[in-house]
Image (cartoon, rainbow, N blue to C red):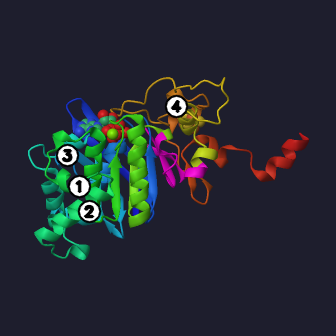
Amino acid sequence: MLTLKDLRVSFHTYAGEVEALRGVNLHVDEGDVLAVVGESGCGKTVTAQSVMQLYPREVIDYKSGEIIYKGQNLLALSEKEMQRVRGRDISMIFQDPMTSLNPTVTVGKQITEAILKSGGKNGARVDKARAEARAVEMLRNVGLADPETRMKQYPHSFSGGMRQRVMIAIAMSCMPELLIADEPTTALDVTVQAQILDLMKQLQAQSGTAIIIITHNMGVVANIAKNVAIMYGGIVVEHGTASDVFYRPRHPYTWGLLKSIFRLNKPKDEPLTPIDGAPPELINPPPGCPFAERCEYAMNICLRGMPGEFSQGERHSCRCWLYDRASLVKPAEWEEYRYA
Ligand SMILES: Nc1ncnc2c1ncn2[C@@H]1O[C@H](COP(=O)(O)OP(=O)(O)O)[C@@H](O)[C@H]1O
Ligand code: SF4
Ligand SMILES: [Mg+2]
């Protein structure tokens, strides 16, 4: 459904060129729930905003690569064509719903307007009464009690979790094929986080909408993700099914992330260990593997060259020199080694 191929994106700033994305490969299947995980500053938001093309063209430079959505390259569309994709095919929700909700307009009106703007199925016109009825239904679907009263209220009378539910209602009201949620629960407390993720899971199952959930907390998405992409330093370092990434992780950064999350099956005396250090600056980033500075397995080659993508199975890949077969002993030479 959506494929990012070697996407390279830079920002021009006074301090220099920020190489925010340095060759991102990513794919989302129809009806997928893809979690994009990585520490802050790894390029998750830039990836999402690039798909939606929400940056003004003056500040961002799409250096190369493609964003293929259902067979067409979104980077080749005009702004007008892109607006149609944004309203109808792909929607996005953000970390802080207060910045995307208008504080001076009732919640009901905001949802109704979103429905009127995007239209019904296949863009058919919807009249105001139908749109309002649908807005009430959407509020009920996202778990708000007494939706008729809620329609008439302003965002400030909603809690953080309820506002995020409203944002989900707005995003889902145009029946998108893909929903991108950028840290949708990060600003919420832990129980509310779990409720919102449950809600998204439930809506996903009902509607079949594919979802990309962006998060810096791997533990949060363990129950909901079908596939996982781990980002680091402007690239996707590991991509696979949730069971591949959680049970057969290959990349040292993924190992680090897994060691730093809480798990019930973890032995009691094994501490949670955060990864030492911080992600690299993306102004003049290192030429080699972006993780090299923090990686306990780093080899000489890691400092010199960006690792390619090495397949780890049908749907599992990893960008780490440890898996470069060219650097390993070749099968034909095994015998020799065994008897040497
Ligand atoms: N508008 C911008 N101008 C300049 N640099 C930016 C801008 N937005 C993001 N960046 C840089 O791009 C990199 C990736 O950022 P981002 O995608 O926001 O990270 P994440 O969402 O994973 O925390 C960071 O180094 C950040 O400083
Ligand atoms: S490429 Fe090298 S530095 Fe990078 S994660 Fe693999 S072993 Fe570590
Ligand atoms: Mg972000």
In the rendered structure, which disc, 2 or 1, sits on the residue that comes first in sequence?
2
Q: Disc 4 marks which residue?
A: 292
Q: Examine the rendered structure and indicate whether residue 239 appears above or below residue 261.
A: below
The residues bearing labels 3 and 4 have C-alpha atoms spaced at a distance of 38 Å
Apparent side of residue 214 relative to residue 140 in the rendered image (left or right): right
Q: Label 2 belongs to which residue?
A: 137
Question: How far apart are the two marked residues, 3 and 1, measured between alpha carbons?
Answer: 20 Å
Q: Does the magenta-highlighted stretch encompass residue 241?
A: yes
Q: Which element type, helix, strand or loop, lies under badge 2?
A: helix
Q: Position of residue 329 (x, y in %)?
A: 74, 45
Task: State the mark number for residue 147.
Answer: 1
Q: Between residues 209 and 297, which one lies in front from this camera angle?
A: 209
Q: Amino acid at mark 3?
A: Ser
> What amino acid is at disc 1?
Pro
Magenta highlight on residue 40: no
Give, as a single range, the part of the protein colored magenta: 220-244
Q: Position of residue 249 (x, y in %)?
A: 61, 44
Mark 4 CB near ligand 2 (8 Å cut): yes
What residue does disc 3 label? 100
Instruction: Estimate the spatial distance between the alpha carbons at disc 4 and disc 2, rounded to whole Å.
Output: 51 Å
The disc label shown at residue 302, or none: none
- Residue 32 appears in which quarter of the rendering? bottom left
Q: Is residue 16 above or below residue 184?
A: above
